Amino acid sequence: MRPFDLLIDKIHQGQNCYTGFPTKEWAGVWYGDHGAMREIFGQCIHRIQPSIIIEVGSFCGESAIHMAKFIKANALDCAILCVDTWAFGYDHFLGAREKIKPHFGRPDLFYRFMANVIEHGCQDVIVPFAIDSINGARVIKWLGLVPNLIYVDASHEEGDVRRDYEAYWSLLPSGGGMLVDDITGWFPGVVADFAAFTKDHNLNPVLVEGEKALVIKA
């Protein structure tokens, strides 16, 4: 079974969640197109050759779409599972609240994510999983899914970040990689938790570019 079909089967009970989605109603919101982001994603995927990638924290889909386009361009048999609540987060209120439009009391992030994935032709690679990060890790483990590459970019608060690192690190097999974001001074909680995590696990990043770093599990 193809990785995409496996994720659809395990997460959505075999029902393709894109079928019938009203793309035109939700299309048109895209928060940037960062070129440097594309390069490090490609380097990580090329290095690890994953069959399943988990993205923890997806927002409107920019990073997942960059990875999916690399996967498609290189004809790789790989799928991306995006774990996110698509609900308001603390950092949204601090820095991006004005970009997020609520509908009946809930933000429209999930619908924007879905529309962006479809508009960019990546609905055969990306699978959404609407759940919080910790429960997502528990379900992924319970389902027996084994990711080779995990990208962590969810909460930026100290303590939350460390919990995400530990929960998803435990899912990786030997040789698997975790790519983390925001390890610069913009988010002191991320900086502190990444430093503690790498020290406790005796890890040295094998790839660092901008705010992102890749660590490999022995």
Image: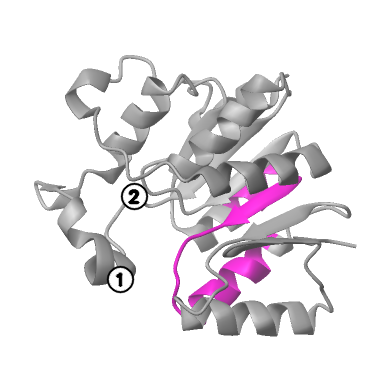
What residue is rendered at 44% in x and 67% in y?
A: 155
Seen from the viewer's position, the closer of residues 182 and 197 is 182
Quarter holding the C terminus?
bottom right
Hey, which quadrant is residue 20 in on the image? Answer: top left
Neighbours of disc 1 within 10 Å: few (<14), some (14-19), many (20+):
few
* Image coords of residue 111 (percent x, y): 28, 35
Instruction: Tell me if residue 203 comes above or below residue 77 in the rendering.
Output: below
Hey, which quadrant is residue 209 in on the image? Answer: bottom right
What residue is rendered at 52% in x and 67% in y?
A: 182
Quick one: which residue is furthest to the front in this view? 35
* Image coords of residue 89 (percent x, y): 31, 64
Residue 22 is at least partly visible in this image: no
Q: Amino acid at mark 2?
A: Trp
User: Between marks 2 and 1, how big is the CA–CA gap?
Assistant: 12 Å
Give the magenta range.
139-168
* Image coords of residue 126 (percent x, y): 53, 31
Describe residue 208's horizontal placement relative to residue 181 as left or right: right
Seen from the viewer's position, the closer of residues 189 and 54 is 189
Instruction: Tell me if residue 169 comes above or below residue 56 in the rendering.
Output: below
The answer to whether residue 163 is magenta is yes
Mark 1 highlights which residue?
90
Describe residue 96's horizontal placement relative to residue 150 as left or right: left
Quarter holding the N terminus?
top right
Instruction: Tell me if residue 82 comes above or below residue 141 in the rendering.
Output: above
What residue is rendered at 66% in x and 57% in y?
A: 179
